[in-house]
Image (cartoon, grey):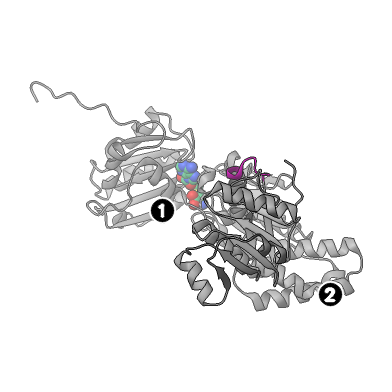
Amino acid sequence: MKLYPLFADLSGRAVLVIGGGAVAERKAATLIEVKAQVTVNAPELTPQLRRWVEQGLIAHRPDAFRETWLDRVWLVVAATSDRETNRLVASLAELRRIFVNVVDDAELSSFHVPAVVDRAPLTIAISSGGAAPMLARLVRERLESLLDPSLGALTTLAARLRTRIRARLPEMAARRRFYEQLFAGPVAALLRQARPQEARRAAERALLAEAKGTQGSVVLVGAGPGDPGLLTLRAVRAMNEADVILHDRLVSAEVLALARRDAERIEVGKQAGNHHYTQDAIHDLLLQHVRAGRRVVRLKGGDPFVFGRGGEELQFLRQHSIAYEVVPGITAALACAAYAGVPLTHRDHAQAVRLLTAQCQRSHDALDWHALAQERQTLAVYMGVSELAAFSARLLAHGRAASTPFALIENGSRAEQRVVTGTLANMPQRASAHNVRSPALLILGEVAALAESLAWFGQPPLGEPRAEPHADG
Ligand code: SAH
Protein backbone atom coordinates (compact mmCIF):
# COMPACT_ATOMS: atom_id res chain seq x y z
CA MET A 1 0.00 0.00 0.00
CA LYS A 2 1.43 3.35 -1.00
CA LEU A 3 0.26 6.23 1.15
CA TYR A 4 0.29 9.95 0.63
CA PRO A 5 2.09 11.63 3.54
CA LEU A 6 0.15 14.50 5.03
CA PHE A 7 0.37 16.78 8.06
CA ALA A 8 -3.08 17.91 9.10
CA ASP A 9 -4.03 21.08 10.98
CA LEU A 10 -6.69 19.87 13.40
CA SER A 11 -6.70 22.79 15.78
CA GLY A 12 -10.31 23.68 16.60
CA ARG A 13 -11.57 20.93 14.32
CA ALA A 14 -13.88 18.21 15.55
CA VAL A 15 -12.55 14.67 15.83
CA LEU A 16 -14.49 11.68 17.06
CA VAL A 17 -12.73 8.93 18.99
CA ILE A 18 -14.75 5.78 19.52
CA GLY A 19 -13.66 3.68 22.47
CA GLY A 20 -12.67 4.59 26.03
CA GLY A 21 -9.75 2.31 26.79
CA ALA A 22 -5.99 2.69 26.85
CA VAL A 23 -5.69 2.88 23.06
CA ALA A 24 -8.35 5.56 22.81
CA GLU A 25 -6.55 7.43 25.56
CA ARG A 26 -3.27 7.42 23.60
CA LYS A 27 -5.02 8.66 20.48
CA ALA A 28 -6.85 11.36 22.43
CA ALA A 29 -3.58 12.49 24.01
CA THR A 30 -1.93 13.33 20.69
CA LEU A 31 -5.13 14.93 19.42
CA ILE A 32 -5.37 17.14 22.51
CA GLU A 33 -1.76 18.18 21.94
CA VAL A 34 -2.63 19.58 18.52
CA LYS A 35 -5.73 21.28 20.00
CA ALA A 36 -8.32 19.22 18.15
CA GLN A 37 -11.88 19.34 19.46
CA VAL A 38 -12.07 15.75 20.66
CA THR A 39 -15.24 13.86 21.51
CA VAL A 40 -14.82 10.42 23.00
CA ASN A 41 -17.67 8.00 22.55
CA ALA A 42 -17.71 5.09 25.01
CA PRO A 43 -19.84 3.97 27.98
CA GLU A 44 -16.74 3.80 30.21
CA LEU A 45 -13.57 5.92 30.25
CA THR A 46 -10.09 5.38 31.67
CA PRO A 47 -9.34 7.59 34.69
CA GLN A 48 -7.12 9.81 32.53
CA LEU A 49 -9.84 10.29 29.92
CA ARG A 50 -12.26 11.14 32.73
CA ARG A 51 -9.83 13.73 34.03
CA TRP A 52 -9.58 15.32 30.61
CA VAL A 53 -13.38 15.47 30.45
CA GLU A 54 -13.44 17.21 33.86
CA GLN A 55 -10.77 19.63 32.70
CA GLY A 56 -12.84 20.43 29.63
CA LEU A 57 -10.13 19.18 27.27
CA ILE A 58 -12.41 16.63 25.62
CA ALA A 59 -16.15 15.95 25.44
CA HIS A 60 -17.73 12.67 26.43
CA ARG A 61 -20.71 10.85 24.87
CA PRO A 62 -21.57 7.76 26.85
CA ASP A 63 -24.60 6.80 24.71
CA ALA A 64 -24.56 4.36 21.79
CA PHE A 65 -22.74 5.51 18.64
CA ARG A 66 -24.96 7.45 16.26
CA GLU A 67 -24.31 7.79 12.60
CA THR A 68 -25.32 11.45 12.50
CA TRP A 69 -22.36 12.43 14.72
CA LEU A 70 -20.18 11.84 11.71
CA ASP A 71 -21.76 14.80 9.94
CA ARG A 72 -19.79 17.35 11.91
CA VAL A 73 -16.35 15.77 12.27
CA TRP A 74 -13.19 15.91 10.16
CA LEU A 75 -11.69 12.65 11.31
CA VAL A 76 -12.77 9.50 13.10
CA VAL A 77 -10.65 7.15 15.13
CA ALA A 78 -12.16 3.75 15.87
CA ALA A 79 -10.36 2.40 18.90
CA THR A 80 -12.75 -0.17 20.29
CA SER A 81 -11.82 -3.78 20.80
CA ASP A 82 -15.00 -4.81 18.94
CA ARG A 83 -14.16 -5.53 15.32
CA GLU A 84 -17.82 -5.24 14.20
CA THR A 85 -18.16 -1.74 15.65
CA ASN A 86 -14.87 -0.72 14.07
CA ARG A 87 -15.98 -2.09 10.73
CA LEU A 88 -19.35 -0.29 10.91
CA VAL A 89 -17.70 3.04 11.80
CA ALA A 90 -15.19 2.60 9.00
CA SER A 91 -17.84 1.96 6.38
CA LEU A 92 -20.05 4.86 7.51
CA ALA A 93 -17.07 7.22 7.48
CA GLU A 94 -16.16 6.01 4.02
CA LEU A 95 -19.66 6.83 2.76
CA ARG A 96 -19.29 10.39 4.05
CA ARG A 97 -15.71 10.73 2.77
CA ILE A 98 -14.39 11.24 6.27
CA PHE A 99 -10.95 9.88 6.97
CA VAL A 100 -10.99 7.05 9.46
CA ASN A 101 -8.28 5.30 11.40
CA VAL A 102 -9.07 1.89 12.78
CA VAL A 103 -6.44 1.11 15.34
CA ASP A 104 -4.23 -1.79 14.33
CA ASP A 105 -6.22 -2.44 11.17
CA ALA A 106 -4.47 -1.05 8.11
CA GLU A 107 -7.12 -2.41 5.77
CA LEU A 108 -10.08 -0.69 7.41
CA SER A 109 -8.17 2.58 7.78
CA SER A 110 -8.19 5.39 5.25
CA PHE A 111 -5.49 7.23 7.21
CA HIS A 112 -2.62 5.88 9.24
CA VAL A 113 -0.96 7.44 12.25
CA PRO A 114 2.80 7.42 11.78
CA ALA A 115 5.57 6.83 14.30
CA VAL A 116 6.77 10.28 15.27
CA VAL A 117 10.03 11.92 16.24
CA ASP A 118 8.94 15.05 18.01
CA ARG A 119 11.30 18.02 17.90
CA ALA A 120 8.44 20.49 17.88
CA PRO A 121 7.97 22.54 15.83
CA LEU A 122 9.94 20.06 13.73
CA THR A 123 8.13 16.76 13.36
CA ILE A 124 9.34 13.63 11.62
CA ALA A 125 6.67 11.09 10.75
CA ILE A 126 7.51 7.54 9.71
CA SER A 127 5.20 5.01 8.17
CA SER A 128 5.67 1.60 6.62
CA GLY A 129 2.18 1.81 5.11
CA GLY A 130 1.06 -0.81 7.59
CA ALA A 131 3.61 -3.30 6.24
CA ALA A 132 5.92 -3.40 9.24
CA PRO A 133 4.98 -1.03 12.05
CA MET A 134 7.74 -2.50 14.23
CA LEU A 135 10.35 -1.55 11.65
CA ALA A 136 8.95 1.97 11.49
CA ARG A 137 9.31 2.13 15.26
CA LEU A 138 12.92 0.99 15.05
CA VAL A 139 13.67 3.67 12.48
CA ARG A 140 12.06 6.15 14.80
CA GLU A 141 14.32 5.06 17.65
CA ARG A 142 17.34 5.37 15.40
CA LEU A 143 16.38 8.92 14.46
CA GLU A 144 15.61 9.76 18.07
CA SER A 145 19.18 8.96 18.96
CA LEU A 146 20.63 10.84 15.98
CA LEU A 147 18.78 14.09 16.40
CA ASP A 148 19.63 16.17 19.40
CA PRO A 149 16.66 17.32 21.49
CA SER A 150 17.79 20.93 20.94
CA LEU A 151 16.71 20.63 17.31
CA GLY A 152 13.27 21.89 18.36
CA ALA A 153 14.76 25.07 19.80
CA LEU A 154 16.84 25.49 16.66
CA THR A 155 13.76 25.24 14.50
CA THR A 156 12.00 27.86 16.60
CA LEU A 157 15.01 30.12 16.30
CA ALA A 158 15.09 29.66 12.53
CA ALA A 159 11.37 30.50 12.40
CA ARG A 160 11.96 33.73 14.32
CA LEU A 161 14.73 34.81 11.98
CA ARG A 162 13.06 33.62 8.84
CA THR A 163 11.90 36.95 7.42
CA ARG A 164 15.23 38.57 8.22
CA ILE A 165 17.11 35.69 6.63
CA ARG A 166 15.01 36.06 3.49
CA ALA A 167 15.59 39.78 3.34
CA ARG A 168 19.32 39.62 3.92
CA LEU A 169 20.03 36.58 1.79
CA PRO A 170 17.77 36.79 -1.24
CA GLU A 171 19.81 34.19 -3.06
CA MET A 172 18.64 30.66 -2.50
CA ALA A 173 22.16 29.20 -2.42
CA ALA A 174 23.31 31.69 0.20
CA ARG A 175 20.24 30.99 2.28
CA ARG A 176 20.87 27.30 2.08
CA ARG A 177 24.46 27.76 3.17
CA PHE A 178 23.33 29.88 6.07
CA TYR A 179 20.78 27.31 7.22
CA GLU A 180 23.36 24.57 6.92
CA GLN A 181 25.70 26.49 9.13
CA LEU A 182 22.85 27.24 11.53
CA PHE A 183 21.99 23.57 11.86
CA ALA A 184 25.52 22.27 12.24
CA GLY A 185 27.66 25.14 13.47
CA PRO A 186 28.17 27.10 16.68
CA VAL A 187 24.53 28.20 16.97
CA ALA A 188 23.36 24.60 17.22
CA ALA A 189 26.22 23.94 19.61
CA LEU A 190 25.10 26.75 21.92
CA LEU A 191 21.56 25.37 21.94
CA ARG A 192 22.91 21.93 22.83
CA GLN A 193 24.74 23.60 25.67
CA ALA A 194 21.42 25.08 26.86
CA ARG A 195 22.48 28.66 26.14
CA PRO A 196 19.50 29.92 24.07
CA GLN A 197 20.15 33.66 24.44
CA GLU A 198 23.71 33.34 23.26
CA ALA A 199 22.55 31.09 20.46
CA ARG A 200 20.16 33.72 19.29
CA ARG A 201 22.81 36.42 19.40
CA ALA A 202 25.25 34.16 17.56
CA ALA A 203 22.66 33.48 14.88
CA GLU A 204 22.02 37.19 14.45
CA ARG A 205 25.74 37.88 14.26
CA ALA A 206 26.19 35.06 11.77
CA LEU A 207 23.45 36.54 9.63
CA LEU A 208 25.17 39.93 9.62
CA ALA A 209 28.52 38.34 8.85
CA GLU A 210 27.28 35.92 6.24
CA ALA A 211 28.54 38.04 3.37
CA LYS A 212 32.05 37.97 4.80
CA GLY A 213 32.47 34.19 4.73
CA THR A 214 32.30 31.79 7.62
CA GLN A 215 34.47 30.12 10.23
CA GLY A 216 34.17 26.41 11.05
CA SER A 217 34.16 24.73 14.43
CA VAL A 218 35.79 21.87 16.25
CA VAL A 219 34.31 19.08 18.32
CA LEU A 220 36.82 17.13 20.33
CA VAL A 221 35.30 13.67 20.57
CA GLY A 222 36.22 10.61 22.59
CA ALA A 223 35.83 7.55 20.38
CA GLY A 224 36.08 5.02 23.22
CA PRO A 225 38.22 1.91 23.13
CA GLY A 226 37.02 0.41 19.84
CA ASP A 227 33.60 -1.18 20.26
CA PRO A 228 31.26 1.31 18.49
CA GLY A 229 28.55 0.41 20.99
CA LEU A 230 30.54 2.36 23.56
CA LEU A 231 30.24 5.66 21.70
CA THR A 232 27.97 8.29 23.18
CA LEU A 233 24.95 9.47 21.20
CA ARG A 234 26.53 12.88 21.07
CA ALA A 235 29.71 11.45 19.56
CA VAL A 236 27.68 9.77 16.83
CA ARG A 237 25.84 13.00 16.10
CA ALA A 238 29.05 14.98 15.85
CA MET A 239 30.49 12.39 13.46
CA ASN A 240 27.32 12.64 11.41
CA GLU A 241 27.70 16.38 11.02
CA ALA A 242 31.43 16.48 10.34
CA ASP A 243 33.05 17.75 7.17
CA VAL A 244 36.46 16.54 8.28
CA ILE A 245 37.51 13.94 10.82
CA LEU A 246 41.04 14.08 12.18
CA HIS A 247 41.50 10.81 14.00
CA ASP A 248 44.18 8.95 15.86
CA ARG A 249 45.40 5.56 14.82
CA LEU A 250 43.73 4.03 17.87
CA VAL A 251 40.24 4.85 16.59
CA SER A 252 38.71 1.65 15.27
CA ALA A 253 37.46 1.15 11.73
CA GLU A 254 34.02 0.24 13.11
CA VAL A 255 33.78 3.62 14.80
CA LEU A 256 34.92 5.49 11.70
CA ALA A 257 32.31 3.64 9.67
CA LEU A 258 29.62 5.53 11.61
CA ALA A 259 30.82 8.93 10.41
CA ARG A 260 29.11 10.85 7.65
CA ARG A 261 29.87 9.05 4.42
CA ASP A 262 31.33 12.02 2.62
CA ALA A 263 33.29 13.38 5.55
CA GLU A 264 37.00 13.55 4.78
CA ARG A 265 38.95 11.24 7.10
CA ILE A 266 42.53 12.06 7.99
CA GLU A 267 44.64 9.83 10.22
CA VAL A 268 46.98 11.92 12.32
CA GLY A 269 48.06 9.04 14.54
CA LYS A 270 51.27 9.26 16.45
CA GLN A 271 52.78 5.84 16.72
CA ALA A 272 55.48 5.54 19.37
CA GLY A 273 58.77 5.94 17.54
CA ASN A 274 57.06 6.69 14.23
CA HIS A 275 55.62 10.17 14.43
CA HIS A 276 53.39 10.80 11.41
CA TYR A 277 52.29 14.17 12.66
CA THR A 278 53.81 16.26 15.38
CA GLN A 279 51.41 17.94 17.80
CA ASP A 280 52.17 21.23 16.05
CA ALA A 281 51.32 19.75 12.69
CA ILE A 282 47.97 18.59 14.10
CA HIS A 283 47.32 22.10 15.39
CA ASP A 284 48.10 23.54 11.98
CA LEU A 285 45.77 21.10 10.32
CA LEU A 286 42.96 21.99 12.72
CA LEU A 287 43.44 25.65 12.01
CA GLN A 288 43.55 25.19 8.28
CA HIS A 289 40.25 23.27 8.15
CA VAL A 290 38.45 25.59 10.55
CA ARG A 291 39.54 28.63 8.55
CA ALA A 292 38.13 26.96 5.46
CA GLY A 293 34.76 26.97 7.25
CA ARG A 294 34.59 23.24 7.93
CA ARG A 295 33.07 21.40 10.81
CA VAL A 296 35.97 19.46 12.22
CA VAL A 297 35.69 16.44 14.47
CA ARG A 298 38.91 15.72 16.29
CA LEU A 299 38.42 12.07 17.15
CA LYS A 300 40.58 10.44 19.79
CA GLY A 301 40.73 6.93 21.18
CA GLY A 302 39.16 6.54 24.63
CA ASP A 303 38.59 9.87 26.31
CA PRO A 304 40.24 12.99 24.89
CA PHE A 305 41.28 14.26 28.31
CA VAL A 306 42.85 11.03 29.55
CA PHE A 307 46.40 10.81 28.17
CA GLY A 308 44.99 12.15 24.94
CA ARG A 309 46.58 15.61 24.73
CA GLY A 310 43.07 17.00 24.27
CA GLY A 311 43.92 19.78 26.70
CA GLU A 312 46.75 21.07 24.55
CA GLU A 313 44.55 21.15 21.50
CA LEU A 314 41.87 23.14 23.30
CA GLN A 315 44.45 25.62 24.56
CA PHE A 316 45.59 26.09 21.01
CA LEU A 317 42.00 26.58 19.77
CA ARG A 318 41.28 29.05 22.54
CA GLN A 319 44.38 31.06 21.61
CA HIS A 320 42.99 31.32 18.10
CA SER A 321 39.42 32.10 19.25
CA ILE A 322 38.03 29.00 17.60
CA ALA A 323 34.76 27.63 18.97
CA TYR A 324 34.89 24.10 20.32
CA GLU A 325 32.95 21.44 22.20
CA VAL A 326 34.16 18.36 24.03
CA VAL A 327 32.41 14.99 24.01
CA PRO A 328 33.81 12.56 26.56
CA GLY A 329 34.55 8.97 25.67
CA ILE A 330 35.00 5.77 27.59
CA THR A 331 38.63 5.62 28.49
CA ALA A 332 40.69 2.44 28.00
CA ALA A 333 41.02 1.79 31.74
CA LEU A 334 37.25 1.68 32.27
CA ALA A 335 36.54 -0.24 29.09
CA CYS A 336 39.31 -2.81 29.59
CA ALA A 337 38.29 -3.33 33.21
CA ALA A 338 34.67 -3.86 32.22
CA TYR A 339 35.46 -6.16 29.31
CA ALA A 340 37.93 -8.22 31.32
CA GLY A 341 35.68 -8.55 34.38
CA VAL A 342 37.95 -6.55 36.72
CA PRO A 343 35.96 -4.35 39.14
CA LEU A 344 38.55 -1.60 39.62
CA THR A 345 37.52 -0.73 43.16
CA HIS A 346 35.99 -3.94 44.48
CA ARG A 347 35.45 -3.00 48.10
CA ASP A 348 37.12 -6.11 49.44
CA HIS A 349 40.36 -5.40 47.59
CA ALA A 350 40.93 -1.76 46.70
CA GLN A 351 40.06 1.69 47.99
CA ALA A 352 41.58 3.63 45.15
CA VAL A 353 42.35 3.45 41.49
CA ARG A 354 45.05 5.42 39.73
CA LEU A 355 45.22 6.07 36.04
CA LEU A 356 48.82 6.49 35.01
CA THR A 357 50.93 6.42 31.94
CA ALA A 358 54.25 4.69 31.53
CA GLN A 359 54.81 5.10 27.82
CA CYS A 360 58.51 5.83 28.05
CA GLN A 361 61.48 6.20 30.37
CA ARG A 362 60.73 9.87 30.93
CA SER A 363 57.23 9.13 32.20
CA HIS A 364 58.69 6.48 34.54
CA ASP A 365 60.98 9.05 36.12
CA ALA A 366 58.05 11.35 36.80
CA LEU A 367 56.07 8.76 38.78
CA ASP A 368 55.86 8.53 42.55
CA TRP A 369 56.95 4.91 42.89
CA HIS A 370 56.66 4.85 46.64
CA ALA A 371 52.97 5.73 46.40
CA LEU A 372 52.40 3.27 43.57
CA ALA A 373 53.86 0.42 45.58
CA GLN A 374 51.17 0.73 48.29
CA GLU A 375 48.76 -2.17 48.64
CA ARG A 376 44.98 -2.19 48.22
CA GLN A 377 44.99 0.17 45.30
CA THR A 378 44.53 -0.55 41.64
CA LEU A 379 46.88 0.80 39.01
CA ALA A 380 45.51 1.21 35.51
CA VAL A 381 48.54 1.78 33.36
CA TYR A 382 48.42 3.17 29.82
CA MET A 383 51.64 1.91 28.38
CA GLY A 384 53.73 0.54 25.61
CA VAL A 385 54.30 -3.19 26.03
CA SER A 386 58.04 -2.64 25.81
CA GLU A 387 57.90 -0.74 29.11
CA LEU A 388 56.54 -3.66 31.14
CA ALA A 389 59.90 -4.99 32.33
CA ALA A 390 61.18 -1.64 33.55
CA PHE A 391 57.82 -0.89 35.15
CA SER A 392 57.58 -4.11 37.14
CA ALA A 393 61.24 -3.91 38.22
CA ARG A 394 60.71 -0.44 39.69
CA LEU A 395 57.51 -1.44 41.50
CA LEU A 396 59.17 -4.50 43.00
CA ALA A 397 62.16 -2.42 44.05
CA HIS A 398 59.80 -0.06 45.89
CA GLY A 399 58.18 -2.91 47.75
CA ARG A 400 54.99 -3.88 45.95
CA ALA A 401 54.42 -7.58 46.66
CA ALA A 402 55.70 -9.94 43.97
CA SER A 403 52.44 -11.87 44.32
CA THR A 404 50.30 -8.85 43.30
CA PRO A 405 47.98 -10.04 40.50
CA PHE A 406 47.84 -8.31 37.15
CA ALA A 407 45.64 -8.45 34.06
CA LEU A 408 47.07 -7.21 30.80
CA ILE A 409 44.34 -6.42 28.29
CA GLU A 410 45.25 -6.26 24.63
CA ASN A 411 42.73 -4.72 22.20
CA GLY A 412 40.20 -4.20 24.97
CA SER A 413 36.52 -4.31 23.91
CA ARG A 414 37.41 -5.38 20.37
CA ALA A 415 36.68 -8.75 18.83
CA GLU A 416 40.42 -9.64 19.05
CA GLN A 417 40.62 -8.85 22.78
CA ARG A 418 43.06 -10.98 24.80
CA VAL A 419 43.61 -10.92 28.52
CA VAL A 420 46.83 -12.24 30.03
CA THR A 421 46.96 -12.68 33.79
CA GLY A 422 49.67 -13.51 36.31
CA THR A 423 51.58 -11.87 39.12
CA LEU A 424 53.92 -8.90 39.26
CA ALA A 425 56.91 -11.25 39.64
CA ASN A 426 56.48 -12.80 36.20
CA MET A 427 54.65 -10.05 34.33
CA PRO A 428 57.21 -9.32 31.55
CA GLN A 429 57.70 -13.05 30.91
CA ARG A 430 53.96 -13.67 30.73
CA ALA A 431 53.54 -10.79 28.28
CA SER A 432 56.29 -11.97 25.98
CA ALA A 433 55.19 -15.61 26.23
CA HIS A 434 51.87 -14.50 24.73
CA ASN A 435 53.43 -11.93 22.46
CA VAL A 436 51.20 -9.12 23.76
CA ARG A 437 51.06 -6.13 21.40
CA SER A 438 49.87 -2.56 21.52
CA PRO A 439 47.34 -1.29 22.37
CA ALA A 440 47.40 -2.93 25.75
CA LEU A 441 46.42 -1.73 29.18
CA LEU A 442 47.80 -3.04 32.43
CA ILE A 443 45.62 -3.44 35.49
CA LEU A 444 47.75 -4.20 38.49
CA GLY A 445 46.40 -4.80 41.97
CA GLU A 446 44.48 -7.22 44.10
CA VAL A 447 41.33 -6.81 41.99
CA ALA A 448 43.04 -8.18 38.87
CA ALA A 449 42.69 -11.70 40.27
CA LEU A 450 38.90 -11.39 39.78
CA ALA A 451 39.27 -11.54 36.00
CA GLU A 452 39.55 -15.28 36.23
CA SER A 453 36.06 -15.68 37.70
CA LEU A 454 34.29 -12.61 36.27
CA ALA A 455 35.52 -12.52 32.66
CA TRP A 456 32.64 -12.60 30.18
CA PHE A 457 33.85 -11.14 26.89
CA GLY A 458 35.88 -12.91 24.20
CA GLN A 459 38.35 -15.67 25.00
CA PRO A 460 38.82 -16.56 28.68
CA PRO A 461 41.89 -15.00 30.32
CA LEU A 462 45.22 -16.62 29.54
CA GLY A 463 46.16 -17.51 33.11
CA GLU A 464 49.17 -19.31 34.42
CA PRO A 465 48.95 -23.07 34.29
CA ARG A 466 48.21 -24.16 37.84
CA ALA A 467 51.22 -25.69 39.53
CA GLU A 468 50.69 -29.40 40.16
CA PRO A 469 51.03 -30.07 43.90
CA HIS A 470 54.35 -31.88 44.42
CA ALA A 471 54.32 -35.08 46.38
CA ASP A 472 57.31 -33.90 48.39
CA GLY A 473 56.09 -30.25 48.64
N1 SAH B 1 42.90 8.74 25.41
C1 SAH B 1 43.05 7.28 25.44
C2 SAH B 1 44.44 6.86 25.83
C3 SAH B 1 45.50 7.19 24.82
S1 SAH B 1 47.08 6.61 25.31
C4 SAH B 1 42.02 6.72 26.42
O1 SAH B 1 41.36 7.47 27.14
O2 SAH B 1 41.85 5.49 26.43
C5 SAH B 1 47.20 5.11 24.43
C6 SAH B 1 47.18 3.93 25.38
O3 SAH B 1 45.85 3.65 25.77
C7 SAH B 1 47.64 2.65 24.75
O4 SAH B 1 49.06 2.54 24.76
C8 SAH B 1 47.01 1.61 25.64
O5 SAH B 1 47.72 1.45 26.83
C9 SAH B 1 45.70 2.26 25.99
N2 SAH B 1 44.58 1.79 25.13
C10 SAH B 1 43.84 2.52 24.31
N3 SAH B 1 42.88 1.76 23.72
C11 SAH B 1 43.04 0.52 24.18
C12 SAH B 1 42.38 -0.72 23.97
N4 SAH B 1 41.34 -0.81 23.13
N5 SAH B 1 42.81 -1.81 24.64
C13 SAH B 1 43.85 -1.72 25.48
N6 SAH B 1 44.51 -0.58 25.71
C14 SAH B 1 44.12 0.52 25.09
Instruction: Work out whether residue 66 can be spotted.
Output: yes
Q: Say which residue appears at 69% left-offset and 56% top-offset.
A: 296
With 173 as the anchor, is 78 left or right in this view? left
Q: Amino acid at mark 1?
A: Leu
Instruction: Work out whether residue 298 can be spotted.
Output: no
SS type, badge 2: helix
Does the magenta segment cover residue 275? Answer: no
Query: In front: 414, or 136?
Result: 136
Q: Quadrant of residue 180?
A: bottom right
Q: Nearer the viewer, mark 1 or mark 2?
A: 2
Up/down of 189 relative to 240, above or below: below
Query: Dot 2 surroundings within 10 Å: few (below 14), some, or many (20 or more)?
Result: few
Q: Quadrant of residue 57?
A: bottom right
Give, as a single range, the part of the protein colored magenta. Answer: 128-135
- Is the shortest distance between ligand 1 and the CB of mark 1 under 8 Å? no
Q: Which mark is residue 163?
A: 2
Q: Which residue is mark 1?
A: 356
Q: Say which residue appears at 34% left-offset and 40% top-offset.
A: 407
